[in-house]
């Protein structure tokens, strides 16, 4: 049955094709049956989401994705809807499952009409059955025109399995892609649906296993997995009544060059809200008194050089360096001392920029770049990072070690020799200054509390995103501030 509760296992397109094969050849479910189930699942979602729609338009390609579209069109006609089906391309292969679905559509009284570029697609609701998961090159010609027609229609679009034009493995747009209001995906959740351009193109994502036995997906190891803070809930168990601040670590935040005190303060305050026992801030001397006055729980120290930083490093459990650090000689000297301190580290923002100039590898740090920072760390363009975020995260982890957090829509967490995790939570309101500083403080605090690096990164990313979603629900996405997350964060670290 369709569900918005998504499975955690993610797969590449070739793996999903193998799942199809196993269902058909090993478990004896005919391909035509799977196609009927897919179309029926999509039609149920369509009727539940748009019950008032009476005029349905379905754009069908030449493969099995088009076959699913034929089924939806037939079921709609049988339910009394006015249906127009457009055939894009040459039509299905003779004798295949899609060809049989087309014959049943014709028997129901719907004859597909050929699609022509520029032709109107004027219906209450449109269904994208154009291109499936096998797409691996730029969308051109009549296919591009059909996608443009869907996107320019002004009508809601339901995508079957994947929005046409979206790469199933990377989440990249292959020239152009359908912007769906809802996407119903089948059998195996494709990893490209949940990161990069995927979330924006999919709209609401609904999953249906098509009644395939659980043994089918269990036969293949997933290529990635969806993250959920609940998976790590044991690390957020109630604290013992005899607890004291020394039990929960001492995080040192290093940052805040002249004019950039806010970033360091937000990281430090987020660390306190995420449960660190003690938080110190090593910042430029001109900021220390202001930070202490605004948030006295932060032990703010004015640091004019390495000598002043040394005793703070000695007392710290973990160091989070980078928020507002800048790239001056002062910043470089502090970062070198941090790198030489022997403490577990989280590096973000300007610390990553300085790392570009002097690359090194460590096993005991967490790096949290956004796509632009990731591109500089890899010596490539940001567009190349976004074109394949999974590959970029793996390359960064291999080059720099530790645990890598690639921020953005569908934030990735990549550890050494581990299946990457993808965070499905979060919202566009997070595209504002300071969000990364808050995330760095959260992960730093979890590290300071003794949580292993990979778990701290996964849990921190999920807590951050969930807090942002709660803050957006309370007041809207536009105008969301990084500090708006803090009260919601506190509630989420106390489940």
Image (cartoon, grey):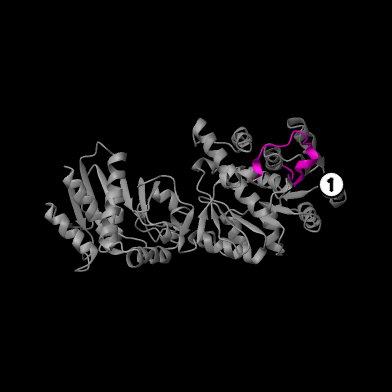
Q: Residue at x 45, y 64 (%)?
A: 219
Q: Residue at x 30, y 55 (%)?
A: 147
Check the image and report above or below for 140 versus 484. Answer: below
Q: Quadrant of residue 82?
A: top left
Residue at the spot of label 1: 315
Check the image and report above or below for 475 versus 264. Answer: above
Q: Is residue 294 left or right of residue 369?
A: right
Q: Position of residue 109 (x, y in %)?
A: 11, 52
* Camera sees residue 180: no
Q: Position of residue 97 (x, y in %)?
A: 23, 63
Q: Residues within 10 Å of mark 1 (few under 14, many from 20)?
A: few
Q: Position of residue 199 (x, y in %)?
A: 44, 50
* Camera sees residue 411: yes
Q: Is residue 408 magenta?
A: no
Q: Is residue 316 left or right of residue 96?
A: right
Q: Position of residue 210 (x, y in %)?
A: 34, 54
Q: Is residue 255 left or right of residue 464?
A: right
Q: Residue at x 22, y 45 (%)?
A: 56
Most foreground residue, 437 or 55: 55
* Disc 1 element: helix
Q: Is residue 78 left or right of residue 273?
A: left
Q: Which residues are magenta?
A: 235-259
């Amino acid at each position: 049955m369709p569900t918005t509760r998504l499975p955690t296992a993610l797969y590449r397109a070739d793996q999903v094709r193998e799942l199809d094969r196993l269902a058909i050849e090993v478990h004896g479910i005919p391909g035509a049956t799977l196609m009927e189930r897919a179309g029926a699942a999509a039609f149920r979602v369509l009727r539940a989401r748009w019950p008032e729609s009476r005029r349905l338009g379905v754009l069908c390609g030449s493969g099995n994705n088009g076959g699913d579209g034929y089924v939806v069109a037939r079921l709609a006609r049988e339910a009394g809807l006015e249906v127009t089906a457009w055939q894009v391309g040459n039509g299905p292969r003779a004798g295949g499952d899609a060809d049989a679905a087309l014959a049943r559509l014709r028997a129901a009284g719907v004859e597909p009409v050929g699609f022509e570029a520029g032709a109107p697609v004027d219906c209450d609701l449109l269904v994208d059955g154009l291109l499936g998961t096998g797409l691996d090159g730029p969308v051109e010609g009549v296919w591009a025109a059909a996608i443009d027609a869907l996107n320019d229609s002004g009508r809601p679009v339901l995508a079957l399995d994947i929005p046409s034009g979206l790469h199933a493995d990377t989440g990249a747009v292959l020239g152009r892609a359908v912007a769906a209001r809802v996407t119903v995906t089948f059998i195996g959740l494709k990893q490209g649906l949940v990161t990069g351009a995927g979330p924006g193109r999919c709209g609401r994502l609904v999953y249906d296993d098509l009644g395939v036995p659980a043994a089918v997906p269990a036969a293949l190891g997933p290529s990635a997995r969806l993250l959920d803070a609940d998976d790590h809930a044991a690390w957020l168990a109630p604290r013992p009544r005899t607890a004291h601040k020394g039990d929960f670590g001492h995080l040192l935040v290093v940052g805040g060059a002249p004019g950039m005190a806010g970033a360091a303060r937000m990281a430090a305050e987020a660390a306190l809200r995420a449960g660190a026992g003690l938080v110190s801030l090593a910042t430029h001397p001109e900021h220390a008194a202001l930070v202490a006055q605004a948030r006295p729980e932060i032990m703010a120290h004015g640091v004019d050089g390495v000598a002043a930083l040394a005793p703070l490093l000695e007392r710290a459990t973990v160091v989070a360096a980078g928020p507002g650090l800048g790239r001056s000689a002062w910043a470089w000297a502090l970062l070198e001392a941090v790198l030489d301190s022997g403490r577990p580290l989280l590096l973000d923002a300007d610390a990553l920029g300085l790392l570009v100039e002097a690359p090194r590898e460590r096993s005991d740090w967490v790096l949290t770049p956004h796509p632009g920072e990731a591109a500089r760390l890899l010596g490539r363009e940001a567009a190349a990072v976004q074109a394949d975020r999974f590959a970029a995260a793996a390359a960064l982890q291999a080059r720099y070690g530790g645990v890598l957090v690639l921020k953005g829509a569908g934030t990735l967490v990549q550890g050494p020799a581990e299946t990457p995790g993808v965070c499905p939570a979060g919202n566009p309101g997070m595209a504002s200054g300071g969000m990364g500083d808050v995330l760095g403080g959260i992960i730093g605090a979890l590290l300071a509390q003794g949580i292993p690096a990979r778990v701290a990164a996964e849990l921190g990313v999920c807590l951050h995103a969930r807090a942002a979603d709660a803050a957006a629900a309370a007041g809207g996405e536009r105008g969301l501030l990084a500090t708006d997350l803090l009260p919601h964060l506190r509630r989420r670290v106390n489940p």
